Amino acid sequence: MNSLALMLIGVAVVIAGYVLYSKFLATRIYKLSPAYTTPAHELSDGVDYVPTNKFVLWGHHFTSVAGAAPIVGPAIAVVWGWLPAFLWVTIGTVFFAGMHDMGSLWASVRNRGQSMGTLSGRYIGGRGRNLFLVVIFLLLLMVIAAFAVVIKNLLIATPTSVIPVWGAIAVAAVIGQMIYRWKINLLLTTVIGVVTLYSLILVGDRFPVVLPDPILGMSPATFWIVALFLYAGIASLLPVWVLLQPRDYINGVQLFIGLGILYGAVLLSSPAVVAPAFNQNVPADTPSLVPLLFVTIACGAISGFHGMVSSGTSSKQLDTEPDARFVGYFGAVGEGLLALGAIIATTAGFRSLADWEAVYASFAVNGVGAFVDGGAAIVNAGLGIPPSLSATILATMAVLFAATTMDTGVRLQRFVVQEAGEIMGLRVNKAVGTLVVLVVAMALVFSSGGDGSGGLLIWPLFGTTNQLLASLTLSIVAVILLRKKRNPAPVLIPLAFVLVMSIYALVVQLGTFWADRSWLLLVLDVVILVASLWVAVEAVAAMNAARGGAFDPETDEPVLAEARKG
């Protein structure tokens, strides 16, 4: 198989999905209306609720959802062969991820920008809400802790990425001022930001930063993790327009250019895919393809984390309701293209099948490392960019994706802590909520030592938890559609598939954790399984009630018998 054909087919499928299927969803299912007043206008506060240009908001949404997971998942999943990963990414992007992301964004916008945790209380019930928040909290904890470790590892392994990664923060702060304070043209602002970021990449490649050991009494690994958490905490407290939004936007543009470089190199060099379509010689520790493929590739096909971003931050910044199509669905397309790039880099970036098999000698492969090394080889062959600079570009891409997801994750987790406080009758302000998030996440990260390896302790449950959360989010969207007397089939079919595969995977993992005596993972697996099944049962009951009951199609509110008689 030639990688060029793989790229062209994949890009054509996901773009066709945006042009055709997203239009169907926007006009026939979600019925996006330009006349609807979004929460960004109704509740505008200059901090969280800020009406935002759809291109800027797309940048925030895309880079927030597209962390390291759409690189890591596909880069690991190709161990089963490139074809299963390719099919799940392309079909998943079109019929699962885009629909899920646009739907959760629309559902939140129609409910004053409320999060999925809060919406579960309205549409599923109080018990469902409480259990939903447990699943959300655990998922966000996995993301925050694991991504801090992933970023730390990349900063140490690729010291040439240090300057562009941290320099991007300063660039973003200036971009925010240019857009909102100085009212400079968006195109000019974008050009200045991108040129500056790529200049920093060139500087970083020339001047790698290797920290001394120790530094301020800490190892380099500990120092980077502490610095990352301090940054994420500060970023989560600032108004979104100051840092989070412009950082995500300019990173989104820069990262799309990075993908363009990778795809351009494929176009010019057309490297052969050396990995088999179906791998008949998988490593001994490789689990079964079904159901593990569908949770190994979570982000890049469908991801519950996207629903948290859609309802946690993006819905509070949507300028007009029709923008949900571009921000939500096209945001998923962007992540699908990243996942496709990861598949190509990790299957065509090696000289031979033997070289590929040497890297994929175990299911526990370093996915980010395989992506950076394979992608750098393709970029070097196709565009003649030196291997070191190629690796710096791709490593910077990976770090910026992970970093923007991490700081958004901290903000979202703070919302969860505040919601939990309200349930318990406590008023938790932003600073206290953020402090709780940082303490819990750092306790997990450093639970196994100063190298931060504890951050990966519960990561094996990320895929299943993430997919379960996606199915539970879709159950809320389905209830809303049923109350509005609209066709729920585009939501219910993916919901059923993802729910079955996720529960199947959790059960399979239970046996693995028991055999490995991984008691923490075993207990968390049981907690997540019970909570998800309970929410699913309550969601089915809510769907039945919505199907048989009388609801106002505009407000979703029940119509009283007296009103029906009148």
Image (cartoon, rainbow, N blue to C red):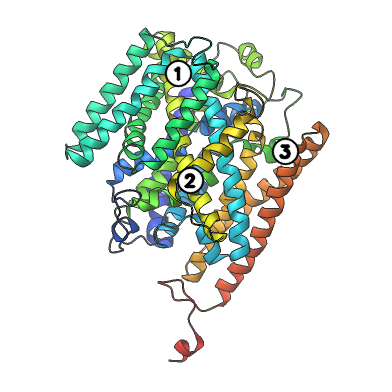
Q: Is residue 327 above or below residue 444?
A: below
From what the image shows, is residue 539 above or below residue 65? below
Asked which quadrant contains residue 142, the reply is: top right
Q: Quadrant of the C terminus?
A: bottom left
Q: Earlier in the sequence, mark 3 or mark 1?
A: 1
List the residue tagged with mark 1: 270
Note whether residue 385 is visible: no
Q: Amino acid at mark 2?
A: Val
Say if mark 3 contacts mark 1, CB within 8 Å. Answer: no
Counting residues from the N terminus, which is met first, the one under dot 2 or under dot 1? 1
Q: CA distance from mark 2 to mark 3?
A: 28 Å
Q: Residue at x 39, y 58 (%)?
A: 109
Residue drawn 47% across and 51% down? 99
> Dot 2 corresponds to which residue?
432
Query: Which of disc 3 and disc 2 is earlier in sequence?
Result: 2
Disc 2, SS: helix
Q: Secondary structure at mark 1?
A: loop
Image location of residue 83, percent across then percent down: 59, 31
Residue 159 visible in the displayed image: yes
Seen from the viewer's position, the closer of residues 216 and 96 is: 216
For the N terminus, the quadrant is top right
- Residue 198 drawn at (x, y percent): 31, 20
Q: Disc 3 designates what residue? A: 521
Extreme residue toward the right, this view: 515
How packed mark 1 is, by other alpha carbons closer than 10 Å (few <14, some 14-19, many 20 or more), is: many
Is residue 527 toward the left or the right of residue 439 in the image?
right
